[in-house]
C-alpha cells in the first residue's frame, strides 16, 4: 500500500511533479492550495464579485462550481451563479444537463440559467451541421460549437450581471490548445490562452478567468470523485473524436507517462510565450463592436454572425 | 456495451486474476503470474494509460503503484472528459 507522505494513511494520488503521495484529506488540501495560489497569482477575483461559472455538467465544471461555492462561503461579498449552454447534441447534452440539475438541486441558493442554441440561433448544433453539409460548407462541428458557445457565454453572463466568468479549463485542456495553435502557427489564439483575459476591454465584454489553469485533468477527476460529484452519466460528445485535440490529448498522456513533467513543461513554455507576446505588443487583444449584433468582436463582423450568415440563419442587407 | 475481454501473460509463479470494469461499460479479466503485481502492470497489459484513469478498489481510490491481489475488482473512472 502506498502511504501518504504527510500522515501515513493510504494514498489516493501520487504527484509526478513532486513525487509526493497524498491521502484523500491531504489531496483535497493540496488541490485547494494549488487553485487558491492560481487565483491569487493572477488576481482573478476582487473583493466584490458576481462570479458566473460556465458549466457543462461534466466533472471539470462541476468541480469548479463546487470549489467556488465552498470558497465563496468564506467571502460573503461574492455571489456565485452558473450558466449552461445547451448546444443541442443528441445523445450527449441531455445527459450532462441531468447531471448538472442533479448537482444544482443540492444548492438552492445558487442561481443558474440554461440557454440553448435552438432558442438563440434557431437551430441545434446537430441541425447546424446538417445545414452546413447541405450548403457544401466545410465539416467543422467543433468550430461552430466553440464560436456559438463563447458568444452566448459572454452575452448571457453579462445579462446575468456577471462581473467575471469562470471557466473550468484545466492544464491538460490548455496545453492541448497551445499545441494545436503551435501547429497552426496561430499566435493570436495562443495570446488568448492566458489564465485571465487581461488586456481585452469592451463595454460588453465580460472578463474571463481559468482557476484550474494549473490543475491536471486527473486532479479535477479525483477531486470530483472524492467530493462525490463525479457525473452519473458517462457520455462522450459524438463530435469530439473528429477533432485533432483527441489525438493530441492521447499523445500527451503517453508522453507524460514516459517522460513525467511533460505537461508542466508545456505550461511553462506557454507562460514564456505569453510573456514574449506581451513584450512584443502582440498580446493586446483589440476588441471592436460587431456591426450586426453589437457584441464584442475582433473583426468588423463577429464570427458568430459570419457563421449564421453562411448557414442562412441570419439575413442582413447587403450594405 | 458489456464486453468481457481476456488478457493474460503467463509467468512462473502464483496466479493473480483481476477483474477490471471501466465505467463506460467495458469489462476485462486480467490474469497475471507473480506475487507482486501493481495496478500499473494491469493497466499496461490493457494498454491503458494511468494518466487517463482514477482507480477505485472496494470503494476506495488507490494509486497506480498499489499492489493487487487475486480476486480484486478495479473500477476505472476515465479522466478524459467527453466534450
Image (cartoon, coloured by chain):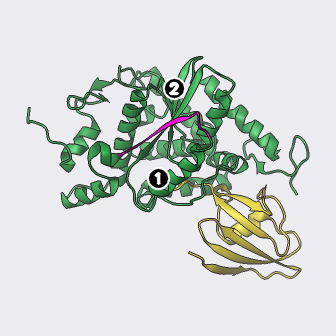
Residue A116 disc label: none
Q: How many marks?
A: 2
Q: Which residue is mark 1?
A: A245
- Work out whether residue A158 or residue A130 is closer to the camera in this orientation and state it: A158
Give coordinates of residue A282: x percent, y percent.
39, 25
Q: Which residue is mark 2?
A: A275
User: Magenta span covers which residues?
Assistant: A107-116
Of the chain colours in the picture, the one used for chain A is green
Q: CA distance from mark 2 to mark 1?
A: 25 Å
Q: Quick one: SS at disc 2?
A: helix
Looking at the rendered image, the quarter that the N terminus of chain A falls into is: bottom right
Give coordinates of residue B34: x percent, y percent.
86, 75
At 69% from the left edge and 33% from the top edge, which residue is drawn? A34
> Of helix, strand and loop, which mostly describes the magenta segment?
strand
At 35% from the left edge and 37% from the top edge, which residue is drawn? A151
**Marks 2, 1: nearer the viewer:** 1
In the picture, one chain is yellow; tell me its letter. B
Amino acid at each position: 500500500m502506498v502511504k501518504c507522505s504527510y500522515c501515513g494513511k493510504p494514498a489516493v494520488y501520487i504527484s509526478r511533479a513532486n513525487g509526493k503521495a497524498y491521502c484523500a484529506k491531504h489531496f483535497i488540501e493540496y488541490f485547494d492550495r494549488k487553485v487558491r495560489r492560481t487565483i491569487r497569482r493572477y488576481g482573478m477575483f476582487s473583493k466584490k464579485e458576481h462570479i458566473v461559472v460556465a458549466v457543462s455538467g461534466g466533472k471539470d465544471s462541476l468541480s469548479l462550481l463546487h470549489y467556488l461555492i465552498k470558497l465563496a462561503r468564506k467571502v460573503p461579498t461574492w455571489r456565485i451563479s452558473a450558466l449552461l449552454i445547451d448546444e443541442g447534441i443528441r445523445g450527449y447534452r441531455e445527459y450532462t444537463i441531468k447531471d448538472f440539475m442533479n448537482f444544482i438541486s443540492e444548492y438552492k441558493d445558487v442561481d443558474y440559467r440554461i440557454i440553448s442554441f435552438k432558442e438563440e440561433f434557431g437551430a441545434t448544433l446537430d441541425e447546424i451541421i446538417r445545414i452546413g453539409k447541405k450548403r457544401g460548407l466545410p465539416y467543422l462541428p467543433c468550430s461552430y460549437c466553440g464560436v456559438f458557445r463563447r458568444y452566448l457565454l459572454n452575452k448571457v453572463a453579462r445579462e446575468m450581471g456577471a462581473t467575471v466568468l469562470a471557466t473550468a479549463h484545466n492544464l491538460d485542456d490548455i496545453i492541448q490548445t497551445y499545441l494545436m495553435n503551435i501547429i497552426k502557427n496561430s499566435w493570436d489564439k495562443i495570446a488568448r490562452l492566458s489564465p485571465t483575459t487581461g488586456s481585452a476591454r469592451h463595454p460588453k465584454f465580460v472578463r474571463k478567468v481559468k482557476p484550474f489553469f494549473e490543475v491536471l485533468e486527473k486532479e479535477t477527476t479525483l477531486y470530483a470523485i472524492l467530493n462525490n460529484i463525479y457525473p452519473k452519466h458517462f457520455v462522450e460528445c459524438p463530435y469530439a473524436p473528429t477533432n485533432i485535440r483527441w489525438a493530441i490529448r492521447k499523445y500527451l498522456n503517453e508522453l507524460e507517462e514516459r517522460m513525467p513533467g511533460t505537461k508542466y513543461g508545456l505550461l511553462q513554455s506557454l507562460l514564456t510565450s505569453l510573456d514574449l507576446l506581451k513584450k512584443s505588443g502582440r498580446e493586446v487583444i483589440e476588441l471592436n463592436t460587431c456591426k450586426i449584433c453589437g457584441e464584442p468582436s475582433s473583426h468588423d463582423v463577429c464570427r458568430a454572425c459570419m457563421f449564421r450568415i453562411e448557414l442562412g440563419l441570419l439575413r442582413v442587407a447587403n450594405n | 456495451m458489456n464486453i468481457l475481454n481476456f488478457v493474460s501473460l503467463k509467468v512462473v509463479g502464483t496466479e493473480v486474476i483481476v477483474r477490471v470494469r471501466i465505467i463506460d461499460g467495458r469489462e476485462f479479466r486480467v490474469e497475471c503470474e507473480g506475487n507482486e503485481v501493481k495496478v500499473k502492470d494491469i493497466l499496461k497489459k490493457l494498454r491503458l494509460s494511468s494518466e487517463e484513469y482514477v482507480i477505485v478498489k472496494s470503494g476506495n481510490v488507490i494509486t497506480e503503484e498499489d499492489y493487487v491481489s487475486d480476486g480484486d475488482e478495479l473500477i476505472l473512472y476515465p479522466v478524459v472528459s467527453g466534450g
